[in-house]
Amino acid sequence: MKNKIYSRSVTIRDNNMNRWAIEFEVRETGPCTRRNVDTFEEFEECFEVSVHGEGGFCSGQCYDSIAPRTSGQKELLDFWTKYHLCGMASGTRAQEEYLNGEQYKKDFDGFVNLFSGYDENFRKQFDSTSFNIMCKFYQVQPKHMAVLRNVIAKYTNNNPIEYILGLDPKRIKNNSNDLWVRYIFLAIRGLYIDKGYKYGTDWLYIPIPKDICKRIDNLCEVLQNEEKELSQNLAVPNDFDMAGDFEATKDTIEKVMEMRECEEEEAKRFVALGIHLQLTFSDLNDTFQSNGDCLYEANGTEYYIGTDDELEQIASDRVYNDDEYEYFWREAVAAKKTTDSLKDWLKSIIDDGWCNILNSWDGKYGEYNIDGEYICVSRT
């Protein structure tokens, strides 16, 4: 059983000014035996670390989508890839660095470019000539050729060209994410067996430091200070904070209209999102924009912002005008999950609330009193 013993969260803005909520957890797993990624020796581990991100249009292990803006954010990504689930990997450091680096991409693309020009008859066979062409192209060392031959024979039926490219010149049969394709290129680079360890034969781990919670605290402090510095740099005259128990009065809306040179409707929606995200005016000002039909974007994320009636109308239009809902109704009828007519079935969906239709993220929304008018905010 895993018991959570520590958690902390921090919000950052990356180099593209996209906003990311990062959550850390440390869990007690109970003693378990693992193999060290560096020494391959067994060790006892009682903890595991989890890092989770949310922002833009993705969540979970989305570190590849974060463009680091600061040294602290680079440290965050290093920490994330190193310690999430104890850095669990199916390869050694050298194997993983190759497969996750630019060289593997270049090697795979080079293979495609090299052999895609050959006709179908050439692809159907893989003889000593083909093997020599491949070895010469990649400058395969003689000491690695025996392992490479064995990998080719065992996993590609003695024909890596047909296995990767197939016989259809318009598409690739197996891409670089395929496990056996990885085997081939690891063998080409002499990394299929690294320090006696064959790739993919076990899970390897990084021992969790005893002071892991302190390390996360220190990292979060750095990230928060960097965000505070960014906010100070973005600050404008008459800046104000919409966090806490902020009240959106008529004076506030008029102030936003003047500062953003916008109409009252946009100003109200701007403030509603600011309260929803607990931001200052300057934190939100540069990235806030309207995408039409109550759809707004800020910090790399889209939101529906409007009155309950406005958003209900948008949801209704979507349900009645999107053929996808009729398809779902037909599937439900075929599966004997409903006996309603299409009209009644669509009405029941709308009656469940607009947020269930417009918010495919988490089905939640916030509602805020903005100068006497209630404005709703929801992820898309």
Image (cartoon, rainbow, N blue to C red):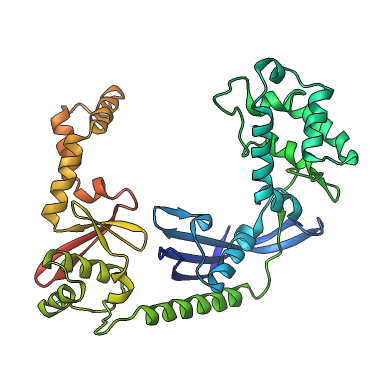
Q: Quadrant of residue 115?
A: top right
Using the image as rendered, state which of residue 307 and residue 352 is in the foreground: 307
Position of residue 199 measured from the top left corner of the image (x, y, whole percent): 76, 44
Residue 118 higher or lower than 46, as above or below: above
Q: Is residue 328 visible?
A: yes
Farthest bottom residue in view: 237
The x, y position of residue 89, in whole percent, is 68, 51
Q: Is 163 on the left or on the right of 256, as rendered?
A: right
As drawn, the residue found furthest toward the right would be: 143
Quarter occupied by residue 231: bottom left
Q: Quick one: which residue is furthest to the front in this view?
A: 117
- Please give left or right for residue 181 compared with residue 334 in the image: right
Residue depicted at 16% across the width and 63% down the height:
375
Quarter of the image for the N terminus: give it.
Answer: bottom right
Residue 351, how many percent across, how many down? 16, 44
Residue found at x 84% / y 23% = 128
Apparent side of residue 133 relative to residue 119 in the rendered image (left or right)? right
Instruction: Report the side of 337 relative to 132 (left or right).
Output: left
Q: Is residue 29 visible?
A: no
Q: Which quadrant of the structure image shows residue 235?
A: bottom left
Q: Residue at x 78, y 59 (%)?
A: 38
Q: Is residue 363 above or below residue 234?
A: above
Query: Residue 291 at what x, y percent from top left?
Result: 24, 54
Q: How many marks?
A: 0
> Looking at the image, is 373 positioned above or below residue 173?
below
In this rendered view, identify the residue nearer to me: 32 or 246. 246
Q: Residue furthest top?
A: 121
